[in-house]
Image: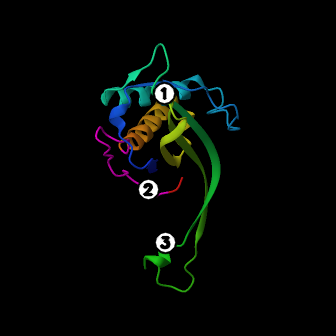
Amino acid sequence: MNVSSHVRRGLDIGQYSTYAWGPADALPTGDSRLDQNPYFQDYVQGAVDKQLAARGMLASRAGTPDLLLHYHASIDTRIDVSRSEREYERCHSSDCSSWVERYEAGTLVLDVVDTRTNRLMWRGWAQDSVEAFENRDRMRRKVTEAVQQMMATFPRAGGEARPPALGGDEP
């Protein structure tokens, strides 16, 4: 799983205590495993709620929350051309060949917006294959893992954030 995040410079997360979920994406992903899937939405929001509660943040029930959360999800077909046999010297003959693998990669992006300034203050993303999404239990485990790894990079009180668990700088 490739996971990373971006945080606004100088952010002091201690100034925020409440959050709410914004409206769902209006644009469909084009994949029935995500579009209008109440389980997927519940898994994502439940995993994020749990992580924020562990940091002392409260879901806002009335009034304007400090933060507005929104997630985006997509599934794309990817192609991986492996040349690793030759590159890692596991193949010594001149007829060493590459292989091509097609797979579906799911990307989950979580945006956190400051409601006072309407500015994005943190974005986390995770990307991995989605063959597990055929089964609800595996989908839940995969979503939970993605959210846990993303939220490990979420800023802590005092402006500190843990470094990303895995991955690079770009989604």
Q: Position of residue 48 (x, y in %)?
A: 43, 31
Give the labeled residue for mark 1. 45
Q: Is residue 129 visible?
A: yes
**Location of mark 2 (residue):** 167
Q: Secondary structure at mark 1?
A: helix
- What is the three-letter code of the residue carrying label 3? Ser
User: Which residue occupies the extreme front position in the image?
Assistant: 117
First in sequence: mark 2 or mark 1? 1
Give the residue drawn at x 62%, y 42%.
74
Res. 110 visible in picture: no
Mark 2 is on which residue type?
A: Gly
Along the line of sight, the residue nearer the viewer: 28 or 104: 28
Seen in the picture, residue 47 relative to 121 is either above or below; the reply is above
Rendered position, 153 above or below 95: above
Give, as a single range, the part of the protein colored magenta: 153-169
Q: Which numbered disc flags the more N-terminal residue, 3 or 2?
A: 3
Give the alpha-carbon distance from disc 2 to disc 1, as whole Å. Answer: 23 Å
- Residue 132 image label: none
Residue at the spot x=36%, y=37% of the render? Answer: 13
Q: Are marks 2 and 1 in contact (CB under 8 Å)?
A: no
Q: Position of residue 50 (x, y in %)?
A: 37, 27
Q: Residues within 10 Å of mark 2 (few under 14, many from 20)?
A: some
The dominant secondary structure in magenta is: loop
Per the image, is 18 magenta?
Answer: no
Relative height, residue 161 to residue 59 (above, below):
below
Residue 116: % across, % down: 50, 30
Three-letter amino acid code of the residue under disc 1 = Gln
The numbered mark, 1 or 3, whose residue comes first in the sequence reads: 1
Residue holding disc 3: 84
